[in-house]
Each structure stands twice: as structure tokens, then as C-alpha cells.
Image (tube, rainbow, N blue to C red):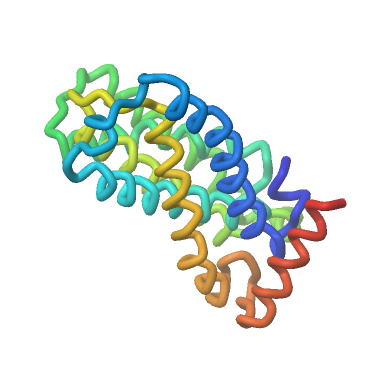
Amino acid sequence: VMSPSYGGRYAYFGSQGVNVLYLVFGGMVLYPLMCCTNQITAAERNTPGLHRKFFIMGVLDCFGTFLAAIGNVYTPGQYQPLLNQTLIPLTLLFSFLGLGTRFRRLEVTGALLIMLGACCSVLPALWEPHQSSKMRWYSVLLYFSSNIPMALSTVYKEASFGDATIHVYYLTQWVSFWQFLFGFVLMPLQMIPGFGTPHGASLADLQRDFYGGFRCYLQ
């Protein structure tokens, strides 16, 4: 609902705005916990390599939310829940490749059926002439591609914190922080045709659209 209301020009602002909201509301919970309780210990915060892991997760999640926001605008809503489900088979695939996880035949069959259902539902619609104004093939591809970094992030979290105890609010706040900062690194990708607009945008357009998204939010 949110991304179509902002439109293609302001979709990037919407993506970054969600990250800001995570930081604000997460901080409202986290910082009182850190100041007034012992739930998040110094030993937990100083775990070796912890912030490197947070950074990697933030980058992967940033790619996921960026691609989803950019592709959302011209991917019809009725297809989005089905495309979201492809996260399941992708996670199974990366778990098998990265963690060596084995799955039962029924689980693999279910994952393949999800992929097949998504393809059978979405691909024929791309060739229907009346869909051209509200559905674009590159947007659907970007929206689907958002599941790849999301699946990688899920597998990486399992590999990094499978046996560790990290407070969920502490983890979420740092991942959101890196996700927000890295989002500005991805901003120039909108200059590439297909990333948000059919013909790409200039740097001046990106700055103007970001400010325009902020004004839209205030309304």
C-alpha cells in the first residue's frame, strides 16, 4: 500500500523512511533497556566480530528492502504475496549451499511448487497488453530479486548467531543503523534505466525526488 502511494519517483524515500522508523521506535525500546536494566550486558555488546556481522546483515537487508521498494510500484498487488513466498525456496537453497542443511523430499517438493506457482501466475501476465500500464517486467524482476539478499541474510544470521545469545532489540537497532546508512550508497542505482523509472534519473532528479518524498510524507 505504501510504495504505490509514493509512486516510482518517491519509492526510494519510502524505503529509507521505513529504516528511520525502525531506528526511532527501536531506540525508544532499546536505550531505556540499556540504561535502566541489565538485560544487555557489556560482555554481550563487546562480543568479538559482532559489529562486522551487524554490518553484513544491514547491507543484505538494505539490498532486499531497496529492491522491493523500487520494484513494488509496477508489480501488481495480487502478485506480490505470491512472489514473497519465493523467499522460502530461496532460503532452503542457500541453507543447503551455505550451511549444508538437508531437507526432506516433501519440503523440497513444496518449495519447488511455490516457485512453479509464482512463475505460472506472473509470467503469462507480463505478455498481456492491458497490463503494460500497471505492470512492468523489470519491476517484477526487481521485486522477486529482493528475496535473494533477504534469504542470504536469513542464512547468515543462522550461521552467525545459531548458538549465540544476542538481545533482539540490540541486534535490530544496529542492523537498522547500517541498513539506513548503506541505503544512501544504493541511491545512485536509480540512475540506471529500470531502477524506479523506465529511463533512469539524473543525480539532480534523485535529490529533488527525495525532498519531494519528504514533502509527500508531511502531507
Figure check: 123 above or below 38: below
**Nearer to us in this view, 198 or 120:** 198
Where is the N terminus found, in terms of image quarters? top right
Can the viewer see residue 141 in this picture? no
| Residue 163 picture location, percent across and down | 18, 23
| Residue 79 picture location, percent across and down | 61, 39
Query: Residue sitting at 54 percent across and 48 percent down?
Result: 123
Please identify the quarter of the rendering in which residue 57 is found: top left
Please identify the quarter of the rendering in which residue 129 is found: bottom right
| Residue 66 picture location, percent across and down | 52, 55
Can the viewer see residue 72 in this picture? yes
Query: Residue sitting at 37 percent across and 20 percent down?
Result: 39
How many labels sit on residues?
Answer: 0
Please identify the quarter of the rendering in which residue 26 is found: top right
**Nearer to us in this view, 18 or 189:** 18
**Nearer to us in this view, 28 or 49:** 28
Answer with left or right where residue 121 lies relative to residue 14: left
Query: Residue sitting at 47 percent across and 59 percent down?
Result: 181
Figure check: 108 above or below 80: above
Q: Residue furthest left?
A: 100
Query: Residue sitting at 54 percent across and 49 percent down?
Result: 68
Q: Residue furthest front?
A: 36
